[in-house]
Image: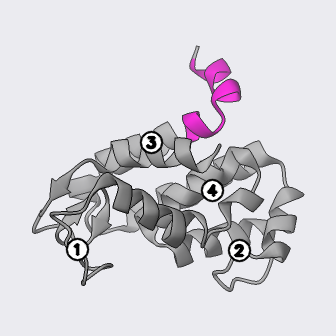
Amino acid sequence: MKFKDAVKLILKFEGGYVDDPLDPGGETKFGISKRSYPDLDIAGMTKEKAREIYREDYWDKLNCDALPPAIRLIVFDAGVNHGVHWAARALQSLANVKLDGNIGPITAAAVGELNARKTLLRYAQKRKDYYWQNRMFFRFGKGWITRLLTVVVESDYENTQIYLK
């Protein structure tokens, strides 16, 4: 999956402006939170600015272009949803490399040696477990799990459709 397709799906999930008092991110638009970007005018942010942030601070920081296409979306989405450091360390744990939170050439090469479909499903399991441990699961859990399942299907569409028929 390419960035333009991945970010289109992320923006669909993240929607527009929200200021939910139960969301620890606080004021949020297109999934970009005031907590993470305190100097940014969240309410006035454009989709173009959100795409730019997603490209630089998530996709590029997670080195998604160096990952197998089938896991790019789930790693990118995890970075958006759980944080870049968590997303990288979760992938590194599956690749059995140093957990430094940085997807560099060593991690990318190790991930490239893995079965992409199995890695996708194992990574999804890690994310599900992480969600279930979150104290806000009662409030946001249904949306998180729906999002995760959608990401898995979109990441490995061809193979997943076999099981959904």
**Residue 159 in magenta stretch:** yes
SS category of the residue bearing label 3: helix
SS category of the residue bearing label 4: helix
Q: Position of residue 13 (x, y in %)?
A: 35, 45
User: Upstream in the sequence, badge 1 or badge 4?
Assistant: 1
Front residue of this view, candidates 146 and 73? 73
The residue indicated by pointer 2 is 103
Q: Which mark is residue 24?
A: 1
**Residue 110 in magenta stretch:** no
Count of numbered circles in the view: 4
User: Upstream in the sequence, badge 3 or badge 2?
Assistant: 3
- For the record, the magenta segment spans 152-164
Rounded to the nearest whole Å, what is the CA distance between mark 1 and mark 4? Answer: 24 Å
Q: Position of residue 48 (x, y in %)?
A: 37, 55
Q: Amino acid at mark 1?
A: Pro
User: Upstream in the sequence, badge 1 or badge 2?
Assistant: 1
**Mark closer to the observer (1, 2):** 2
Q: Position of residue 154 (x, y in %)?
A: 56, 35
User: Upstream in the sequence, badge 3 or badge 4?
Assistant: 3
**Mark closer to the observer (3, 4):** 3
Rounded to the nearest whole Å, what is the CA distance between mark 3 and mark 4? Answer: 18 Å
The residue indicated by pointer 3 is 9
Q: Residue at x 74, y 43 (%)?
A: 117
- From this view, report whether residue 51 is shown above or below residue 106: above
The residue indicated by pointer 4 is 123
User: Upstream in the sequence, badge 1 or badge 3?
Assistant: 3
Q: Main secondary structure of the magenta part?
A: helix
Structural crowding at the residue carrying mark 2, measured as other residues with C-alpha within 10 Å and reported as few (<14), some (14–19) or many (≥20): many
Q: Amino acid at mark 3?
A: Leu
SS category of the residue bearing label 1: loop
Rounded to the nearest whole Å, what is the CA distance between mark 3 and mark 2? Answer: 22 Å
